[in-house]
Image (cartoon, rainbow, N blue to C red):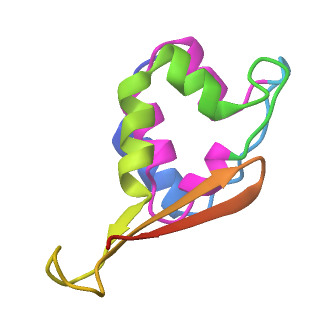
Amino acid sequence: MENKPNAVSLLLSMDCKLLYNISDLSAIDFAIHYKFSEAALAMVTHKDRGNEVMCLKSGKHPCVTLALIAAMPKVFEAVQDKCITKANCKKDSKSFYVSFLGVRGGGTLALTFFII
């Protein structure tokens, strides 16, 4: 077994199915278990399917977020960074805001902060 982030990205882009193996492990569970941080990073930050990967649940990791925080904190940091957007204006403008869009328990959580 090897850590192949380019192959992971390609498969996700080709709309591969995210299934569970006989041990009830998903692809992200497998990457976390074997410490394949580059493959895990490719999965959770994928532009189209990252949220889908983050919503996977298994007996081993009922919450991917907690598993990443415990096993691969740098990978989870990248997930958080991907969720942040800032207004396209100066920080001292009245229109400036910071928005956080994340996934929690299969749903989407959106927070917007206006800086006054």
Image x and y of residue 54, in percent: 63, 44
Q: In this view, does 48 lie above or below 26?
A: below
Q: In this view, does 62 lie above or below 14?
A: above
Q: Can residue 30 be seen in this view?
A: yes
Comparing 1 with 43, the one in front is 43
Q: In which quarter of the image is residue 15?
A: bottom right
Q: Tell me what residue is drawn at x 72 percent, y 31 percent.
A: 63
| Relative to 63, 92 lies left or right | left
Numbered range of the magenta stretch? 25-54
Image x and y of residue 29, in percent: 65, 25
Q: Tell me what residue is drawn at x 60 percent, y 66 percent.
A: 110
| Relative to 1, 109 lies left or right | right
Q: Is residue 49 above or below residue 19?
A: below
Does residue 80 belong to the magenta stretch? no
Residue ranking furthest to the front: 116
Does residue 35 belong to the magenta stretch? yes
| Relative to 69, 9 lies left or right | left
Q: Tell me what residue is drawn at x 40 percent, y 32 percent.
A: 75
Q: In which quarter of the image is residue 88?
A: bottom left
Q: Is residue 50 above or below residue 63?
A: below
Image x and y of residue 68, in percent: 54, 26
Comparing 88 with 39, the one in front is 88
Q: Is the magenta stretch mostly helix, strand or loop?
A: helix
Numbered circles on residues, count? 0
Q: In which quarter of the image is residue 115?
A: bottom left
